[in-house]
Amino acid sequence: MTALMPRQRDCLNFIRGTIAASGMSPTYEEIMDALGLRSKSGVHRLVTGLEERGAIRRIPGLKRTLKLVGAEDESDALAFLDPYSRHLLARFAGRKKMTSHAALAEICRRFFSERSAA
């Protein structure tokens, strides 16, 4: 990861703190409010810069998909999912206000409990 500008460092620290506190990445609106920016385009520039510098990864077009690079092992349980499945999992997790890992565990629990009942 290359050196970050001060504003990018503030943004990254906010993202890191939000993920640590809630298990979910912040929305652009939350970042905008926390950093005192006037528009989401400013947040977009910061997030794009963080992504270009290798500090985060994201799935464009979806909310709460910012992920800290190096925060988790690449042998992650979600790594086997194709992009569409990750999208569906992110939507399910967002509705239930849980992390993607917790959502995957919940889906597996439901799936296997239904199969054992049949």
Image (cartoon, grey):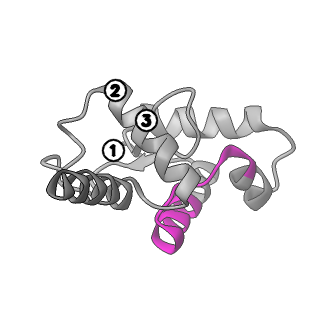
Q: Mark 3 or mark 1: which comes first in sequence?
A: 1
**Left of 24 or right of it: where is 37?**
right
Where is residue 75 shown, x and y percent of the image?
Answer: 12, 48
Identify residue type, mark 1. Met
Camera-side residue of 56 and 20? 20
Q: Mark 2 or mark 3: which comes first in sequence?
A: 2
Q: Which of marks 3 and 1 is in front?
A: 3
At 35% across and 62% down in the image, what residue appears? 102
Identify residue type, mark 2. Pro
Instruction: Give the CA separation, mark 3 to mark 1.
Output: 30 Å
Identify residue type, mark 3. Leu
Q: Is mark 1 on a helix, strand or loop?
A: loop
* Residue 80 in sight: yes
Q: Give the range drawn in magenta.
A: 13-29
* Residue 65 in sight: no
Residue 118 forms part of the magenta stretch: no
At 55% across and 60% down in the image, what residue appears? 97
Where is residue 118 shown, x and y percent of the image?
Answer: 18, 51
Instruction: Give the CA separation, mark 1 to mark 2.
Output: 25 Å
List the residue tagged with mark 1.
Answer: 1
Q: Which residue lies furthest to the bottom in this view?
A: 21
**Label 3 Cα crowd, 10 Å radius (few <14 / some 14-19 / many 20+):** few
Where is residue 103 shown, x and y percent of the image?
Answer: 38, 55
**Left of 116 or right of it: where is 20?**
right
- As drawn, the label of residue 83 is 2
Q: What element carries label 3?
A: helix
Residue 28 forms part of the magenta stretch: yes
Q: Nearer the viewer, mark 2 or mark 3?
A: 3
Q: Nearer the viewer, mark 1 or mark 2?
A: 2
- As drawn, the label of residue 9 is none
Q: Residue 26 falls in which quadrant of the image?
A: bottom right
List the residue tagged with mark 3.
Answer: 88
